[in-house]
Amino acid sequence: MSLTALELSEIFKDSKHSLTYFSQEEIDKVLSGVFDKGGKPYLKCFASGKDRPAKPEELVRQLWIRRLHFQYGYELSRFRIEHPITFGRDTSKKADIVVMDADRPTTEYLIVEVKAAKLTEGRDQLKSYCHAKGAPLALWSNGTNAQAYYRKSPNYFIDLSDIPSADQTIEDILQKPWTLDTLVEFEKRRQPARLLRDIILDMQNDVLANAGVDVFEEVFKLIFTKLFDELEVFRERSKVLRFRNTNTATDVHNRIQKLFDQAQKEWPGVFPKNDKIRLTPDHLQVCVGSLEEYKLFNSNLDVIDDAFEYLIGQTAKGEKGQYFTPRWVIDMCVKMLNPKEGEAMIDPACGSSGFTMHTIFKVWRDIIRDEGLAISHLFTLQKKPYRCDRYVQNNVFGIDFDEKVVRVARCLNLIAGDGQANVLHLNTLNWNHWNETVKRDSWADTYFSGWTKFRTLQENEDSYKLFHFDVLMANPPFAGDIKQGDMLALYEMGKKANGKIESAVGRDLLFIERNLELLRPGGRMAIVLPQGRLNNASDKQVRAFVADQCRILAVVGLDPNTFKPHTGTKTSVLFLQKWNADASEPEYYCPRTEDYNIFFATQQVPSKNSRGDKLIATAPDGSQLQDGHGHWLIQHDLFNHDGLTDDGIAEAFVEFGIKEQLSFF
């Protein structure tokens, strides 16, 4: 019998094992040998020939036996299964797989454990086995991930990027330098089940929780340093990657600290001056070993997007009603608003800069295509045309009142802007107090350059109320009321019909009004709002205010799971264009009219399940889809992803916009 997908799923239902580390071809080879024995699935061990129940751990073991034989070239005669490991009088321990030395058949060379324990537990068990038998090599895997170790001395183990094949020595692996191509190969082996955020969670549970440090700060430093290391290699300022777990813990600490110092000089304004890595050498070595195989740069920085979302989520960001906007929602907004090279764009509640970064990516691609250049899977690393740098440095702005997320946003925008960023730490709503903030030397040291460019878009240099941005995209905080009278007095929505100040107003409502103040006449906006704002009877005044200020272009209802696991609030994206009767700038012409068509759509294909896990899109044959850069595609019906999926809501809106003669199409 060959296990069906349903039967295989049932076997793994309550298991901590999986098969995602292996190719479908490898899995099919093992499953094709499954047979019925007493009404239960069995298979014949490829090394020993014995019949074994086809349980999760056994399936993983057989996959490794076959890989060690066919890919690494180890002869089956060298394999021992359930090999006894003796500790004094204790003879109960048995290693899952042992490969014996080629020249000394009674000496253990490689010990493999396929237990479902956590990596740290598996590593500790392997170390004890290697100590007991003197084996120089060890490998742990649960079918989702794998980690190899070299026993350099009785009490010192080094993480290996791979185990040597049968015709290689351990020195061949240890001395092989890593480049970006090495990280690309690691990326190809991985499946979407093992994300960078999972690695960070393991680090937090196993190392950082007891390290006496701020987890966000120290992981941020490591990601920052690794980004710098990858960029140095790509731009050929370094021949090999230095973010590596090699040599002693002290050597690793000194090397990573030096890299961090260099990164701070290249990209200032993210960390305090002369900041240091505060992890001990031993803790740092474990963290570097966990992160070293991950390539952070790709064509859209989604690897670190996901990691930062997790990290900032751990600092109670959700308590403020702020949640990261899923990148597929952002891309839909970018496609629908169609920002262009000469336009100024802002996100006044920017978080980790999703809207700004994806706007940058869209305009970059337009420029690169216009110049007849190719876009690689290392798009964000590429040295781009001057037009690309100029666009980021002069046209893209972000504001947020959360200092931690501003630093993340600045980090990403510094990379994109080749060392410059226009992300400002300000309270967008409380603009009447900006002068107090910008006069602080500590603030000016970091933000003055971006602030100077930001002020060029003021309508009146004596006031921070009105600006002339062409495009605005934002997901303002969902929750929390503003109760400060001086702030409410700045807004029409902060006052009652008789002109008196309201006692409390939803923060998102004030953001609607503030966003419109930031836009020029004819400027366009996408804003994520709780769905109730668009249909609750109590919010009729809000809808009347919006209709008076703007043409309502579109309303797109998002799937209820969009912001899970943070919140189950139903949300919609509202698309607006400010009225503008001035026909001298046709690309911003939007004359007031009482009767016009509005585009309505609702997402039908969910992108997350009820737990908040992302759902990968599948091809007709059931295989999971990747784009041309190797990114896993999230399923949705919001837009067509480079021809790999069907047209969606964004394409329908573009067609609508052309028919309606919207100015920005």
Image (cartoon, helix red, strand yellow):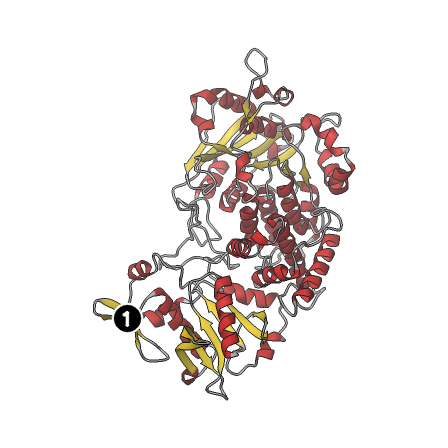
Q: How many marks?
A: 1
Q: Nearer the viewer, residue 189 or 175?
A: 175
| Element assignment for label 1 | strand
Residue 495: give x, y in percent of width and height.
58, 17
Residue type of the residue flagged with mark 1:
Tyr
Q: Residue furthest left?
A: 38
Residue 405: give x, y in percent of width and height.
62, 42
Location of the N terminus by quadrant is bottom left
Q: Residue furthest top?
A: 498
Q: Nearer the viewer, residue 247 or 356?
A: 247
- Residue 406 appears in view: yes
Residue at image location 52% in from the left, 46% down from the top: 327
- Is 272 displayed left or right of 526 in the figure? right
State which quadrant residue 136 falls in: bottom right
Residue 508: give x, y in percent of width and height.
54, 29
- Is 183 displayed left or right of 660 in the figure? right
481 over 362 or under it: above or below: above
Please tell me how crowded label 1 is: few (under 14), some (14-19), or many (20+) other residues with Cα within 10 Å.
Answer: many
The residue labelled by disc 1 is: 42
State which quadrant residue 95 falls in: bottom left
Q: Residue furthest front?
A: 89
Q: Nearer the viewer, residue 339 or 157?
A: 157
Residue 602: give x, y in percent of width and height.
41, 37
Location of the C terminus by quadrant is top right
Residue at image location 47% in from the left, 56% down from the top: 632
State which quadrant residue 400 falls in: top right
Q: Nearer the viewer, residue 53 or 574?
A: 53
- Residue 300 appears in view: no
Residue at image location 64% in from the left, 21% down from the top: 490
